[in-house]
Image (cartoon, rainbow, N blue to C red):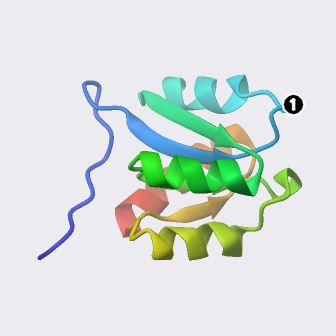
């Protein structure tokens, strides 16, 4: 069986798991994705139990890890493997740079 990843389209939003502190704003990434023509569903978590709950309840196409959130990228990758989530995990960056990295990650995956 071959898994095929599809890029988001106007009718199908990109489902992103965002590991980021709740006190940090989301508008920068949302605006950058919108400007690039993407609709996104962002699920933000900042503690390990919330990460576990999100992974078991939803299907994600990508994870973005903000190192300041207190959850390591390695833990996210490990949880994805345990739950058979086949999605790229990238580090958080400036919103416009992040959009390019999202596109690259999705094309490689």
* On screen, residue 17 above or below 89: above
Picture coordinates of residue 77, whole percent (x, y): 58, 72
Badge 1 is on which residue? 23
Instruction: Name the residue: 44% across, 68% down.
Output: 83
* On screen, residue 43 above or below 17: above
Most extreme residue toward the left, as rendered?
1
Q: Is residue 51 left or right of residue 69?
A: left
Picture coordinates of residue 105, whole percent (x, y): 47, 62
Of the 4 image quadrants, the one containing the C terminus is bottom left
* On screen, residue 84 above or below 25: below
Picture coordinates of residue 24, whole percent (x, y): 84, 32
* On screen, residue 44 above or below 61: above
Instruction: Name the residue: 69% across, 39% down.
Output: 95
Of the 4 image quadrants, the one containing the N terminus is bottom left
Picture coordinates of residue 5, whole percent (x, y): 27, 58
Q: Quadrant of residue 78?
A: bottom right
Q: Is residue 67 left or right of residue 31?
A: right
């Amino acid at each position: 069986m071959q898994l095929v990843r599809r890029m988001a389209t106007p009718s199908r939003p990109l489902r992103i798991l965002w590991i980021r502190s709740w006190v940090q704003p989301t508008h920068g990434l949302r605006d950058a994705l919108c400007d690039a023509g993407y609709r996104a569903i962002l699920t933000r978590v900042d503690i390990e139990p919330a990460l576990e709950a999100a992974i078991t309840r939803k299907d994600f196409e990508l994870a973005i890890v903000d190192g300041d959130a207190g959850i390591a990228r390695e833990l996210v990758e490990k949880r994805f493997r345990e739950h058979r989530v086949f999605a790229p995990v990238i580090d958080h960056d400036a919103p416009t740079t992040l959009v390019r990295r999202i596109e690259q990650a999705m094309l490689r995956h």
